[in-house]
Amino acid sequence: MKHANILITGATGSIGTTLAKQLSAQGIAFRAMVRTIDDNARALHALPGAEVVTGDFNDAGSVAKALQGIEKAFLLTNSSEHTEKQQSDFVDVALQAGVQHIVKLSQLHADAASPVRFLRYHAAVEEKIRTSGIDYTFLRPNLFMQGLLGFRDPIIQQGKFFATAGDARISLVDIRDIAAVAALALTTPGHAGKIYDITGPESLTHTELAAKLSTALGRPIQYINVAPEQLLQALSRAGFPSWQAEGLIEDYAHYARGEAAAVSPVVQQLTGQAPRNFDQFLLDYVNLFA
């Protein structure tokens, strides 16, 4: 396996880990930037072709070190009030390091004028990359199916989950399909200057998700629509920082307005495989809800 010229940031998160596993399985060497060497980082290190380095988005020197000899970078950080600056600083360092292509994980409907703070910061970073002159591919996925794991406890304990999505349809996507598109953008030509909307193959309401969960688990699971204030309180109790909790409320209002219902053909077009549907996701993850 040749020297790694791909850097994965956010490498111990769900998408970063999935991407790392897919690249490794394809025999493609990569470098993973992690904050600390913990169990997740050690698991990455055990993958064939993986090189693990420590780096902190708030420390330009450590990022520069991680980017030495790198041609293509996958850009992903946690969502916080610092994300826009962290990612923008990363672009500056990448430019100096001679990185040729940044594949950025963005979000469906990223827009500088959006009422959703997450969509505004993604748009700002996209613009920063565009004007840097570095080749780019922007991946704009919809709500993650794996995000439902955040509702695990109430599903297991109460047979219920709570959100503010109303009866809006959402074309949820499996993170394995997002990672597959990212892997292609990092390893094959023809993706520079492209923006890819990434969705699943169907648009479902949260009530329909609950019905499918009920079938998969063999017991009734109910979706309860709550007021934004109730969800905000629940997120705060669960330990979410206020900036992030308020952002999630904005995000869900965006879903409730029906703005994330459209189905995109991108996964099928690029990978040649139909994106996983929610039934397939449940088949693979059902034990986590049991």
Image (spheres, rainbow, N blue to C red):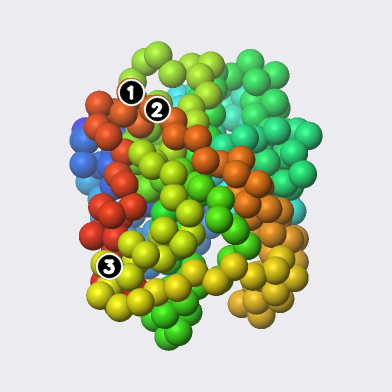
Q: Compared to 99, does 158 lie above or below?
A: below
Q: Compared to 127, does 10 lie above or below?
A: below
Query: Residue 53: image x %, image y %?
Result: 45, 49
254 sits to left or right of 68: right
Query: Residue 246: image x %, image y %?
Result: 73, 61
Image point 63% across, 62% down: which residue? 164
Q: Compared to 83, does 72 lie above or below?
A: above
Secondary element at tag 3 = helix
Q: Most extreme residue toward the bottom, as rendered? A: 157
Q: Is residue 163 visible?
A: yes
Secondary element at tag 2 = helix
**Residue type at the position of mark 2:** Val
**Residue type at the position of mark 3:** Thr
Image point 57% across, 37% down: which residue? 108
- Disc 3 marks which residue? 215
Image point 65% across, 29% down: which residue? 126
Q: Quadrant of the C terminus?
A: bottom left
Considering only order in the chain, which callout, 3 or 1, is on the residue closer to the N terminus?
3
- Disc 2 marks which residue? 266
Query: Residue 26: image x %, image y %?
Result: 21, 35
- Disc 1 marks which residue? 269
Proximity of marks 1 and 2: CB atoms separated by less than 8 Å? yes
**Residue type at the position of mark 1:** Gln
